[in-house]
Image: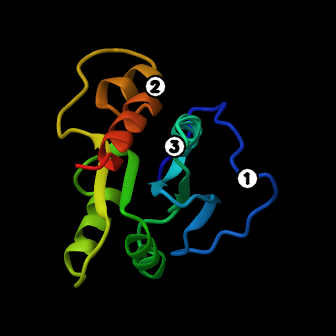
Amino acid sequence: MRIGKKGEPVLHAKATALRIGKAVTLREGGDACLIGAGTILSEVMKVAEVLAGDGIRVRVESFHTVKPLDEERLAELFGRYPLVAVAEEHGLMGGLGGAIAEWRARQEGRLARMLSFGAEDSFLHEIGSQDYARRRYGIDAATIASRVRAALRPQ
């Protein structure tokens, strides 16, 4: 369970019925998809705004439950978009990104490229704010937007 530190922005304009194992679309877009869980979603929404300024329209999905994983939604997203980026305030291993990567590995056929954003498998030995920690681990809006933008550029 991820619990905020207070002051996170409201992401839903109206009350949303949450169902265990079913993702919620927070923003529509056709160029790529961003997936987040918990408090990082406010940062993911900032990424969507930054990319919109560059003319890149991204869909934002809230996977508020990791288990059970919304495999039906994942199949839709990985089949529709050229890039799916997963961001979480968690380690890169053993969280949402890892669960999605494991699901993806079991699929056949051509699927979207995946980027994963989270904390490396190490301790943060400094003291700092949540914003500092996000920047340190590359899960801040500027870093995520930069990597998504680069991944969408034609090779």
Q: Which residue is mark 1?
A: 12
Q: Nearer the viewer, residue 155 or 141?
A: 155
Residue 137 seen in render: yes
Q: Nearer the viewer, residue 39 or 135?
A: 135
Q: Which residue is mark 3?
A: 44
Q: Which residue is mark 2?
A: 130
Give residue 7's quadrant in the image.
top right
Mark nearer the N terminus (3 vs 1) = 1
Distance from the alpha carbon under mark 3 to that under mark 1? 14 Å
Q: Residue at x 41, y 71 (%)?
A: 67
Say what amino acid the circle numbered 1 marks.
Answer: His
Q: Residue at x 26, y 60 (%)?
A: 98
Compared to 30, does 73 lie above or below? below
Residue 95 seen in render: no
Compared to 76, does 88 lie above or below? above
- 2 vs 1, front mark: 1
Q: Residue at x 49, y 65 (%)?
A: 65
**Could you tell whether 10 is left or right of 33 in the image?**
right
Distance from the alpha carbon under mark 2 to that under mark 1? 22 Å
Q: Within 10 angstroms of label 3, few (less than 14), some, or many (20 or more) residues?
A: many
- Secondary structure beneath disc 1? loop
Q: Position of residue 135 (x, y in %)?
A: 37, 24
Q: Residue at x 40, y 48 (%)?
A: 87
Compared to 55, does 81 lie above or below? below
Say what amino acid the circle numbered 2 marks.
Answer: Gln
Mark nearer the N terminus (2 vs 1) = 1
Distance from the alpha carbon under mark 3 to that under mark 2? 15 Å
- Secondary structure beneath disc 3? helix
